[in-house]
Image: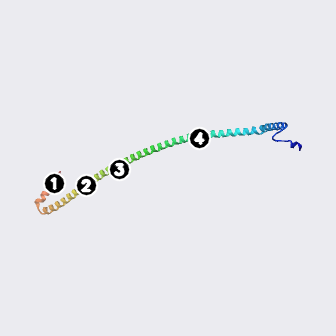
Amino acid sequence: MIFLAEFSVIKPDIGLLFWSTVIFILFWVVVGSLAFKPIVRALKKREQDIQNSLDEAKRAREEMANLKAENEELLRQAREERSRILREAKEIGDKMVAEAKEKAKEEARRIVTEAKEQIENQKRAAMIEVKNELGMMAIQIAEKILRKNLTGDKEQEAYVKSLIDEIKLN
Protein backbone atom coordinates (compact mmCIF):
# COMPACT_ATOMS: atom_id res chain seq x y z
CA MET A 1 0.00 0.00 0.00
CA ILE A 2 2.89 2.15 0.33
CA PHE A 3 3.23 2.01 -3.38
CA LEU A 4 -0.29 3.31 -3.84
CA ALA A 5 0.18 6.08 -1.34
CA GLU A 6 2.94 7.62 -3.40
CA PHE A 7 0.91 7.34 -6.61
CA SER A 8 -0.55 10.60 -7.95
CA VAL A 9 -2.60 11.03 -11.04
CA ILE A 10 -1.52 14.55 -11.50
CA LYS A 11 2.14 13.64 -11.42
CA PRO A 12 2.46 10.27 -13.18
CA ASP A 13 5.62 8.30 -13.08
CA ILE A 14 7.78 7.86 -16.22
CA GLY A 15 7.30 4.14 -16.19
CA LEU A 16 3.57 4.54 -16.01
CA LEU A 17 3.65 6.94 -18.91
CA PHE A 18 5.82 4.59 -20.95
CA TRP A 19 3.69 1.54 -20.35
CA SER A 20 0.45 3.46 -20.84
CA THR A 21 1.75 4.72 -24.17
CA VAL A 22 2.93 1.24 -25.26
CA ILE A 23 -0.39 -0.35 -24.30
CA PHE A 24 -2.30 2.46 -26.01
CA ILE A 25 -0.26 2.03 -29.23
CA LEU A 26 -0.73 -1.76 -29.14
CA PHE A 27 -4.42 -1.33 -28.48
CA TRP A 28 -4.65 1.17 -31.34
CA VAL A 29 -2.83 -1.18 -33.75
CA VAL A 30 -4.93 -4.18 -32.76
CA VAL A 31 -8.21 -2.26 -32.88
CA GLY A 32 -7.14 -0.51 -36.11
CA SER A 33 -6.34 -3.78 -37.84
CA LEU A 34 -9.27 -5.74 -36.46
CA ALA A 35 -12.00 -3.14 -36.14
CA PHE A 36 -11.19 0.01 -38.10
CA LYS A 37 -10.46 -1.68 -41.44
CA PRO A 38 -13.84 -3.50 -41.53
CA ILE A 39 -15.58 -0.34 -40.27
CA VAL A 40 -13.87 1.76 -42.96
CA ARG A 41 -14.73 -0.86 -45.60
CA ALA A 42 -18.37 -0.93 -44.43
CA LEU A 43 -18.54 2.87 -44.50
CA LYS A 44 -16.99 3.00 -48.00
CA LYS A 45 -19.42 0.29 -49.19
CA ARG A 46 -22.34 2.21 -47.64
CA GLU A 47 -21.10 5.44 -49.25
CA GLN A 48 -20.86 3.69 -52.61
CA ASP A 49 -24.35 2.14 -52.18
CA ILE A 50 -25.77 5.55 -51.32
CA GLN A 51 -24.04 7.10 -54.35
CA ASN A 52 -25.36 4.28 -56.57
CA SER A 53 -28.86 4.83 -55.17
CA LEU A 54 -28.60 8.57 -55.84
CA ASP A 55 -27.38 7.92 -59.39
CA GLU A 56 -30.20 5.42 -59.93
CA ALA A 57 -32.73 7.92 -58.58
CA LYS A 58 -31.34 10.59 -60.91
CA ARG A 59 -31.62 8.21 -63.89
CA ALA A 60 -35.16 7.30 -62.81
CA ARG A 61 -36.10 11.01 -62.61
CA GLU A 62 -34.63 11.62 -66.06
CA GLU A 63 -36.44 8.58 -67.44
CA MET A 64 -39.70 9.74 -65.83
CA ALA A 65 -39.21 13.18 -67.37
CA ASN A 66 -38.62 11.55 -70.78
CA LEU A 67 -41.67 9.32 -70.35
CA LYS A 68 -43.75 12.30 -69.31
CA ALA A 69 -42.64 14.21 -72.41
CA GLU A 70 -43.42 11.18 -74.60
CA ASN A 71 -46.81 10.75 -72.93
CA GLU A 72 -47.64 14.40 -73.48
CA GLU A 73 -46.63 14.07 -77.14
CA LEU A 74 -48.75 10.93 -77.53
CA LEU A 75 -51.66 12.68 -75.83
CA ARG A 76 -51.30 15.66 -78.17
CA GLN A 77 -51.22 13.34 -81.19
CA ALA A 78 -54.25 11.44 -79.90
CA ARG A 79 -56.18 14.70 -79.48
CA GLU A 80 -55.27 15.78 -83.01
CA GLU A 81 -56.29 12.38 -84.37
CA ARG A 82 -59.58 12.53 -82.46
CA SER A 83 -60.41 15.99 -83.80
CA ARG A 84 -59.47 14.91 -87.34
CA ILE A 85 -61.71 11.83 -87.07
CA LEU A 86 -64.57 13.94 -85.69
CA ARG A 87 -64.17 16.44 -88.56
CA GLU A 88 -64.19 13.63 -91.12
CA ALA A 89 -67.21 11.99 -89.50
CA LYS A 90 -69.09 15.30 -89.53
CA GLU A 91 -68.22 15.86 -93.20
CA ILE A 92 -69.31 12.33 -94.09
CA GLY A 93 -72.52 12.75 -92.09
CA ASP A 94 -73.30 16.06 -93.80
CA LYS A 95 -72.58 14.50 -97.18
CA MET A 96 -74.84 11.54 -96.41
CA VAL A 97 -77.65 13.87 -95.28
CA ALA A 98 -77.29 15.94 -98.45
CA GLU A 99 -77.34 12.79 -100.61
CA ALA A 100 -80.38 11.47 -98.75
CA LYS A 101 -82.20 14.79 -99.23
CA GLU A 102 -81.36 14.80 -102.94
CA LYS A 103 -82.55 11.20 -103.33
CA ALA A 104 -85.74 12.03 -101.44
CA LYS A 105 -86.39 15.03 -103.71
CA GLU A 106 -85.70 12.93 -106.77
CA GLU A 107 -88.01 10.17 -105.52
CA ALA A 108 -90.72 12.75 -104.75
CA ARG A 109 -90.41 14.20 -108.28
CA ARG A 110 -90.62 10.69 -109.75
CA ILE A 111 -93.70 9.85 -107.66
CA VAL A 112 -95.39 13.14 -108.60
CA THR A 113 -94.60 12.55 -112.29
CA GLU A 114 -95.95 9.00 -112.13
CA ALA A 115 -99.07 10.20 -110.31
CA LYS A 116 -99.65 12.89 -112.95
CA GLU A 117 -99.23 10.29 -115.71
CA GLN A 118 -101.66 7.94 -113.98
CA ILE A 119 -104.16 10.75 -113.48
CA GLU A 120 -103.83 11.72 -117.16
CA ASN A 121 -104.23 8.08 -118.26
CA GLN A 122 -107.28 7.62 -116.02
CA LYS A 123 -108.69 10.91 -117.32
CA ARG A 124 -108.25 9.74 -120.93
CA ALA A 125 -109.75 6.36 -120.09
CA ALA A 126 -112.70 8.07 -118.40
CA MET A 127 -113.16 10.41 -121.40
CA ILE A 128 -113.05 7.45 -123.81
CA GLU A 129 -115.52 5.56 -121.65
CA VAL A 130 -117.81 8.61 -121.49
CA LYS A 131 -117.54 9.05 -125.27
CA ASN A 132 -118.29 5.36 -125.82
CA GLU A 133 -121.28 5.56 -123.46
CA LEU A 134 -122.50 8.71 -125.19
CA GLY A 135 -122.00 7.05 -128.57
CA MET A 136 -123.92 3.98 -127.43
CA MET A 137 -126.67 6.14 -126.00
CA ALA A 138 -126.83 8.17 -129.21
CA ILE A 139 -127.03 4.98 -131.26
CA GLN A 140 -129.77 3.59 -129.03
CA ILE A 141 -131.72 6.85 -129.22
CA ALA A 142 -131.25 7.02 -132.99
CA GLU A 143 -132.24 3.38 -133.32
CA LYS A 144 -135.43 3.96 -131.32
CA ILE A 145 -136.26 7.07 -133.33
CA LEU A 146 -135.58 5.29 -136.62
CA ARG A 147 -137.66 2.29 -135.65
CA LYS A 148 -140.52 4.50 -134.76
CA ASN A 149 -140.19 6.53 -137.98
CA LEU A 150 -139.40 3.63 -140.31
CA THR A 151 -142.16 1.28 -139.40
CA GLY A 152 -144.77 1.02 -142.07
CA ASP A 153 -143.44 3.41 -144.61
CA LYS A 154 -142.21 1.85 -147.86
CA GLU A 155 -140.14 4.77 -148.82
CA GLN A 156 -138.22 4.69 -145.60
CA GLU A 157 -137.60 0.97 -145.93
CA ALA A 158 -136.13 1.49 -149.38
CA TYR A 159 -133.89 4.25 -148.08
CA VAL A 160 -132.60 2.00 -145.25
CA LYS A 161 -131.85 -0.81 -147.73
CA SER A 162 -129.87 1.54 -149.92
CA LEU A 163 -127.87 2.67 -146.89
CA ILE A 164 -127.16 -0.93 -145.93
CA ASP A 165 -126.01 -1.76 -149.45
CA GLU A 166 -123.81 1.30 -149.45
CA ILE A 167 -122.18 0.23 -146.16
CA LYS A 168 -121.60 -3.28 -147.48
CA LEU A 169 -119.87 -1.91 -150.57
CA ASN A 170 -117.45 0.18 -148.51
Image quadrant where residue 162 sits:
bottom left
CA gap between label 3 and label 4 equals 63 Å
Task: Tell me the residue that label 1 is attached to.
Answer: 165
Camera-nearest label, 1 or 4: 4
Residue 52's x, y, as percent?
Answer: 65, 39
CA gap between label 1 and label 4 equals 126 Å
Report the residue at 68% width, 39% height from top. Answer: 47
CA gap between label 2 and label 3 equals 28 Å
Q: Secondary structure at mark 1?
A: helix
Q: Nearer the viewer, residue 167 or 20?
A: 20
Q: Earlier in the sequence, mark 4 or mark 2?
A: 4
Residue density around tag 1, few if under 14, some if 14–19, many if 20 or more, within 10 Å: few
Camera-nearest label, 4 or 2: 4
Which numbered disc covers residue 61? 4
Residue 120's x, y, as percent?
Answer: 26, 53
Q: Amino acid at mark 1?
A: Asp
Report the residue at 71% width, 39% height from top. Answer: 43
Is mark 1 in CB contact (under 8 Å) with mark 4? no
* Coloration mode: rainbow
Q: Earlier in the sequence, mark 1 or mark 4?
A: 4
Is mark 2 in CB contact (under 8 Å) with mark 3? no
CA gap between label 1 and label 3 equals 64 Å
Task: Tell me the residue that label 3 is attached to.
Answer: 104
